[in-house]
């Protein structure tokens, strides 16, 4: 079944640890995104990718990094986690191109809730 | 400057009452607008898009270019409508499109 998967769903770690949040999609989409959702529920784009070997920083500055070696996989890494990184991270994919046939819809994963102590 | 404005962070109504979640936008071209919804403990998902002119779960949204608005409406709110609602605008970004998000409105439908 075509879907977008995020792991782990919940992660509690100590300051200074390196973490990777995994995101995989079987939708066949070229475009993938990472959003940070703060406690006030605002959505902030932190990274996006329009295809393999393409990554860009989003609107909100983030100390995290991403990679896109395979179309279906878009992991996010924090080299040294801090309490300020505590948040909900949402991965999404889409076909947000200019073709008239595309619907412009983003498909989201269930999210990874990160708590850094 | 914010391109998509949702003026209400919280909206509380009683079951059976009409509900309107406001969304205003600024965009120079022909806008493509969406409403996304996030129910408690569920993933964020598309509710409706303006080009479809459809009604989903009793919700409708009409694009008013004169008022640059895309308000989401439902005549009789239900408790299961309680959720976080985001308005979003799709704009051209090179050869791709980019979604501009509002800050969201939390709707609480009280029994």
Image: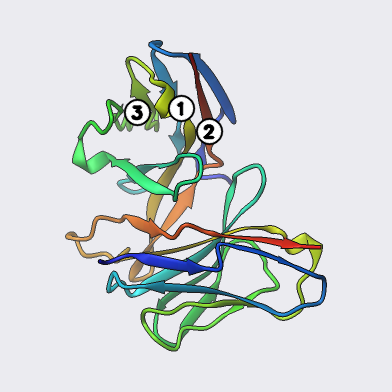
* Residue of label 2: B105
The x, y position of residue A94, in whole percent, is 34, 64
Q: Nearer the viewer, mark 3 or mark 2?
A: 2
Judged from this view, the residue extending furthest toward the left is A101
Asked whether residue B33 appears in the rendered view, the answer is no
The x, y position of residue A5, in whole percent, is 42, 67
* Residue of label 3: B66
Helix, strand or loop at mark 2: strand
Against A92, residue B30 (above or below) is above
Residue at horizontal 66%, vertical 74%? A64
* Residue of label 1: B22
Q: Earlier in the sequence, mark 3 or mark 1?
A: 1
The residues tagged by marks 3 and 1 sit, at their Cα atoms, a distance apart of 15 Å
Q: Nearer the viewer, residue A68 or B70?
A: A68
Q: Earlier in the sequence, mark 1 or mark 2?
A: 1
Q: Which of the 4 image quadrants contains residue A97?
A: bottom left
Chain ID at mark 2: B
The residues tagged by marks 3 and 2 sit, at their Cα atoms, a distance apart of 23 Å
Helix, strand or loop at mark 1: loop
Residue at horizontal 76%, vertical 72%? A81
Are discs 1 and 2 less than 8 Å apart at CB?
yes
Q: Nearer the viewer, mark 3 or mark 1?
A: 1
Q: Nearer the viewer, residue A113 or A46?
A: A113
Q: Which of the 4 image quadrants contains residue B7?
A: top right
How crowded pointer 3 is (Cα within 10 Å; few <14, some 14-19, many 20+) is rated as: few
Are discs 3 and 2 less than 8 Å apart at CB?
no
Helix, strand or loop at mark 3: loop
How crowded pointer 2 is (Cα within 10 Å; few <14, some 14-19, many 20+) is rated as: many
């Amino acid at each position: 079944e075509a879907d977008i998967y995020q792991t782990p769903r919940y992660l509690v770690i100590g300051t200074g640890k390196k973490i990777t949040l995994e995101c995989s999609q079987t939708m066949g989409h070229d475009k993938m995104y990472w959003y940070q959702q703060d406690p006030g529920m605002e959505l902030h784009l932190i990274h996006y990718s329009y295809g393999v070997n393409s990554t860009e920083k989003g609107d909100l500055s983030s100390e995290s990094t991403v990679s896109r070696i395979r179309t279906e996989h878009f992991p996010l890494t924090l080299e040294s986690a801090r309490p300020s990184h505590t948040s909900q991270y949402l991965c999404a994919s889409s076909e947000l191109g200019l073709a008239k046939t595309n619907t412009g819809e983003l498909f989201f994963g269930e999210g990874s809730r990160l708590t850094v102590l | 400057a914010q391109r998509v404005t949702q003026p209400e962070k919280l909206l509380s109504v009683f079951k059976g009452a009409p509900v309107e979640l406001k969304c205003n936008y600024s965009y120079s071209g022909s806008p493509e607008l969406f409403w996304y919804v996030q129910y408690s403990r569920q993933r964020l998902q598309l509710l409706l898009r303006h080009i479809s002119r459809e009604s989903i779960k009793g919700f409708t949204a009409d694009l008013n270019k004169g008022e640059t608005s895309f308000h989401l409406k439902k005549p009789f709110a239900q408790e299961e409508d309680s959720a976080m609602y985001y308005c979003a605008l799709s704009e051209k970004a090179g050869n791709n499109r980019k979604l501009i998000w509002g800050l969201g409105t939390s709707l609480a439908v009280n029994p």
